[in-house]
Image (tube, rainbow, N blue to C red):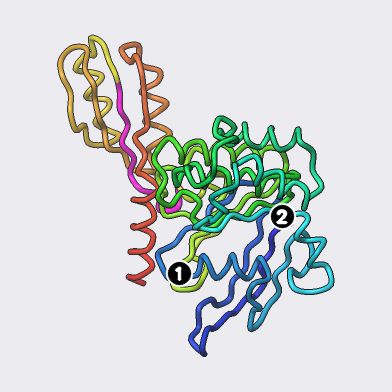
Amino acid sequence: MNINFQDIDYSYNKTPVLHNINFSVAAGLCCALIGHNGAGKTTLIKLLLGMLKPDAGTVTLCQHNPIGKQEKLIKSQIGFVPESVHFHPNYTGLEFMQYVAKLKAVTAADIQHKLELTNISFAQHKKIGEYSKGMKQRLGLAQAMLGNPKVLILDEPASGLDPDSRQILYRSLQAHAQAGNTVMFSSHALNDIELYIDHIILLNEGGVLMDCSIHEYRHALKQPVTIEIQTTDAQPSFYKALDQFGDIQAKQAKDSLIHINVPYSKKLAALAFITAADCVNDVRLLDASLETIYHQLLKKEANR
């Protein structure tokens, strides 16, 4: 595993911040670290980078302790983007990338590839002082990806970005993970990330509440699902049969759009019936958003 936390406890001024943290992230995964403010996301990232030392337990990054004899080796295998990135305003984007490339001993071709991958190559000859926040964030990501690090770590990388910039960012992270690397980032914008991540670590009150795939996260509560059905010339017998699966919320006599709320246990049977019906033109599952599931999971935990 490229990232591993085992039995981690951490306190600040004798106040517990993290307790009994256990999880790992393998190569090829894009993992989101989610949780409320104060849940411990940034502290976890600092522990992973060797900026903090745990009170108990073991942190390994690329199979090594981030604090110790292998520190230089580890730094050569990781890329990091903090929440707020700062650059010398008089450098151009290209000059900054060339400076970092010398430190990492990478080629000019790699510079251009990362500038293009993060969609910032168009501004490489501009002074960084003229960059927008989104452009600076993309440049920060481009430099972190130089040399194709095994592990890419980002702290709230989408903070303050417009929707287009967020999409570019997440596509870049997904591509890096799909190339066989590990990506882990913290995020508040849950609904933006679903298409781009493989795994979720949900922190709550300093502990790990969930450590699972995006599919497992979505089905954790086994909630009722809403199925949207587009029909043409549906007969009364179709609606009568549909009633056995759940509550029909809306229907019209012809060319209708039907919404039916189905218990989780009946979802597969309902879909099998619907897709086999001749009057059905299209079917769509209207799943709850990641953010809705997040709040429901925290509510369930609070009620225990």
Q: Which mark is residue 78?
A: 2
The amino acid beneath tag 2 is: Ile
Query: Residue 211, image x and y in percent?
Result: 55, 58
Q: Say which of marks 2 and 1 sits in front.
A: 2
Quarter of the picture holding the C terminus: bottom left
Q: Which residue shows up at 59% across the image and 38% down it?
A: 172
Quadrant hosting residue 5: bottom right
Q: Is residue 28 above or below residue 124?
A: below
The residue singled out by tag 1 in the image is 39
Residue 224: say if magenta: yes
Measured Cα–Cα span from mark 2 to mark 1: 24 Å
Nearer to me, 21 or 217: 21
Q: Secondary structure at mark 1?
A: loop
The amino acid beneath tag 1 is: Ala
Query: Given the current orientation, which residue lies at the most extreme left position?
Result: 253
- For the record, the magenta segment spans 219-229
Query: Residue 47, image x and y in percent?
Result: 63, 71
Classify residue 293 as left or right of residue 54: left
Nearer to me, 65 or 25: 65
